[in-house]
Amino acid sequence: MEYRMLGGTGTVVSAQCLGTMTFGSESSEEVSHAQLDLFVERGGNFIDTADVYSRGVSEEIIGRWLANRRGVRDQLVIATKGRFPMGDGPNDAGLTRTHLSRALDASLQRLGVETVDLYQAHAWDPLTPIEETLAFFDDAVRAGKIRYFGVSNFLGWQLQKAVLLARHGGRPPIVTLQPQYNLLVRDLEFELADVCRDENIGILPWSPLAGGWLTGKYVRDQPPTGATRLGEDPQRGMEAYVPRNAQERTWQVIDAVRQVAEARGVSMSQVALAWVADRPMVSAVILGARTVEQLDDNLGAAGLHLSEKETALLTQASASIVSDYPYGAPGVAQRARTLS
């Protein structure tokens, strides 16, 4: 396992982070605990969850695992998130001081810890002034309930605004951004990646395998069936089969990943994970597995670095389709810096 700095902090995290969205839903408690054991055995020290994952059950599963592993808590960096509804009341959602205070206390109780290392705003809240949210994070740091804070699913202007308000308000900095990022979804490179580089914010990509597409499990023009996320529901969210199947770019990327994997003698998953892990400003890649076997394969990407030729092949094959301005070639030429 390789280790990196958590954004601009001095805290060290494993370059692979164990995501736990499957805990309590797609993964039983027994399987979830087995995943946690395997991850720590392989040198992983970074675990990410959220209060809405299985409506708190994911945090509870982690909490019971921690309670039965004496001394392991001090070796881990634990992250969770708050923002989305956990009740039916008018103040049971959002980035307000009211909701986040309750949400953080509930997360601490479910996890069985006094402090979480990284607390994240799960998404932007258009109804709450971001100054209120930043003030809550500041107070939570001072109270010893959290060590750092970050954000997830923010747009470029939202992240930059929050960063500047925190700085000029004399508050602790935003240290991480958790966005969707993979070979099929590279839109954060338009603006978010540059903000992260300029502000020394670590990127924590979620869905690095694009909901299983980059594992090679799906076949062109054959809607999946069986025990996979899209097999159970081909219309599932951003990963829906029909629209992605219709895009030639999807299969172009998958073919490129397969080419590199076969030449390397590794799985397609490992190639896709290695590509995103070495993108600029990535602190750790969030792994989300349903089974121990899937996690075991994902962990095989630890320490895997692609050659310049392999990286170029994947980067070119996955180039986002955009209009010329402001994100196409003419627009990129006007930017102060470009991604390598």
Image: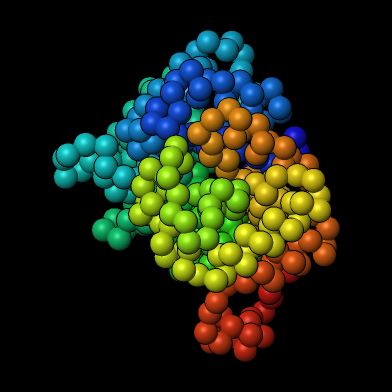
Residue 300: horizontal and vertical position, in percent? 72, 37
Q: Is residue 231 visible?
A: yes
When the figure is inspected, residue 31 is found, relative to residue 12, above or below; the finding is above
Q: Residue at x 76, y 56 (%)?
A: 260
The image shows a total of numbered marks equal to 0
Q: Residue at x 45, y 49 (%)?
A: 224
When the figure is inspected, residue 306 is found, relative to residue 291, above or below; the finding is below
* Quarter containing the C terminus: bottom right
Colour style of the rendered protein structure: rainbow
Occupied quadrant, residue 145? top left
Residue 148: horizontal and vertical position, in percent? 53, 41
Residue occupying the far front of the picture: 222
Front-lying residue, 21 or 130: 21
When the figure is inspected, residue 52 is found, relative to residue 305, above or below; the finding is above
Residue 186: horizontal and vertical position, in percent? 57, 64
Q: Relative to 32, is 277 on the left or the right?
A: right
Occupied quadrant, residue 286? top right
* Quarter containing the N terminus: top right
Front-lying residue, 186 or 31: 31
Front-lying residue, 182 or 291: 291
Q: Residue at x 70, y 45 (%)?
A: 267
Q: Relative to 116, is 328 on the left or the right?
A: right
Front-lying residue, 271 or 191: 271
Occupied quadrant, residue 227? top left
When the figure is inspected, residue 86 is found, relative to residue 39, above or below; the finding is below
Residue 7: horizontal and vertical position, in percent? 63, 49
Q: Relative to 41, is 122 on the left or the right?
A: left
Q: Residue at x 71, y 28 (%)?
A: 43
Residue occupying the far left of the picture: 89
Q: Is residue 143 visible?
A: no
